[in-house]
Image: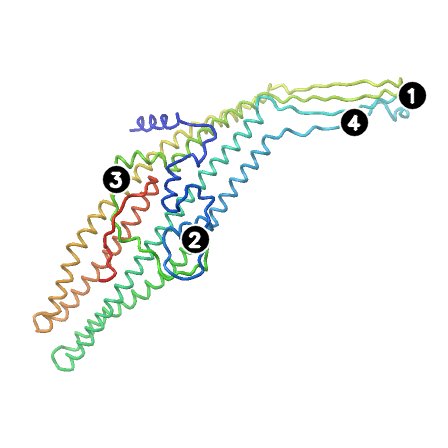
Amino acid sequence: MLSKLLLLSGIFLSIITPYASAQDSSAVNQFYEEFTGQTNVDSLDFEVQETSGVLSLNDAIIIGLKNNPRLKSKHLEINAYQAAALQAGLYPNPGVGVDLENFLGSGDYGAFGASENTFFITQDFILGGRLSKAEKLELLNSNLAKWELEKERLSLITEIRKSFTVILSLDRQNKLNKKLLKISRDFITDLERRIKAGKVSPAEASRASLISTSLEIKIQSAEMRLASETANLKALLGVTDLDFSSLENICNLQYDVPEFGELKNLILESPSLAQFKTEMKRVKTAVELEEAKVVPDLSLSLGYRRINETSDNVIVFGASIPIPIFDDNRGNIQRAKIREDQTKYNLTGAITLTEARLRTLYNNVKALDVMIEKLGTESLPKAKDALKIINEGNLVGRFTVLDVLDAQRNLFELESQFVNAVAEYNRNVIDLEELTLTKFNFKYKARINEDE
């Protein structure tokens, strides 16, 4: 297995291109276009609406891409590396100096009459192509920062989509709780009338009130979580004062998920793996830069000398270069080569982990799809029918109040399980789409019927 991964890594790295940019990834750009309508997200133009209403997913993503502070920080990181590249390509400044000899001594050298005054300019010349390699290294760092920006953008899109599913599921859960609470209260009211008529024991009312109390606690807890998740969504969008009354429902969908083999072929396009093209180019350039440092710098000087004793003027020239006897930069070269080998193994490990995550997400989606189908078509309808039958039977004495309470609790648990399964299904699909940079086809399916 390891040999196959290493071979895959070698094939992957063989397609390295100099100065690979995150913008070269058509898969990334197409994924952006699915949500924003544009491939160049840096040129998005969208004004935050002041009026309240339904916030669509695409609008939320565009707002987040324009306003999220984490993305702005990543943009500045790119600019910083580009500035470093500019600096790395600059030649050192020339130096000017003066050299005074044979003055303020004794005898004929007591003043400046026999002095020799030299004015010179010195320039260091960087050999071995070190400047161009240093500039190239910083540009590659800039491109790696671009990949980090793309990863942050994709992560933000995923977080916003997941936040939508959490808020929608909490809102739906809250509506179910309130609906069941109303049913329980109506049941208790009817029960109290029957107690007064002497048909039911007062102890039965105590049992029924426990369900109402439990639902009231759950409603309060859900509303607090809903407020927290809404605040979290606004923080992701970078607009904390954004006003909206509700979110576009993205939970009533059934996705057409491709086969695992097809998805596996797509993961190399994901930024977490695609960035290794640039990373390998960067570590290779780092090796070249350290090797270039073995070539010593040449220092040349040119000057004008005035010999006061004879009133003559002469031109002086000097050159110097270090002799690399003791320091040949071998340690730094060795370290750079180790980093190069390390990057290859990092790629192998990243491919392994990505494939494992892909398998986990794929299996989760398939399992949740089956669970939702069974809950929606079998368990819930049966639980509703059972509650109806038991309710009717209780009125004529065939079932006890405890039977009714058990039926209500069973329906409540199944409804909660169904809502949670739909939310979990959506979250796994969202992760799967981010990992493969693919927006799956979907069809509308009333998995959560708001009218029920």
Nearer mark to the viewer, of 2 and 1: 2
Residue appearing at x 16%, y 82% in the figure: 196
* Pointer 4 local density, CA inside 10 Å: few below 14, some 14–19, many at least 20: few
**What residue is disc 1 on?**
108
**What residue is disc 4 on?**
98
How far apart in space, not on screen, are marks 1 and 3 (Cα)? 98 Å
376 or 42, which is in the foreground? 42
Mark nearer the N terminus (2 vs 3): 2
Nearer mark to the viewer, of 2 and 4: 2
Query: Residue 258: which disc?
Result: 3
Q: Secondary structure at mark 2?
A: helix
Mark nearer the N terminus (1 vs 4): 4
* Pointer 3 local density, CA inside 10 Å: few below 14, some 14–19, many at least 20: few
Whole-percent x, y for residue 34 in the image: 36, 44
175 or 302, which is in the foreground? 175
User: Does the residue at mark 2 contact the one at mark 4 (Cβ under 8 Å)?
Assistant: no
Q: Secondary structure at mark 4?
A: strand
Mark nearer the N terminus (2 vs 1): 1
Whole-percent x, y for residue 282 in the image: 48, 30
User: Does the residue at mark 4 contact the one at mark 3 (Cβ under 8 Å)?
Assistant: no
Residue 237, placed above or below residue 17: below
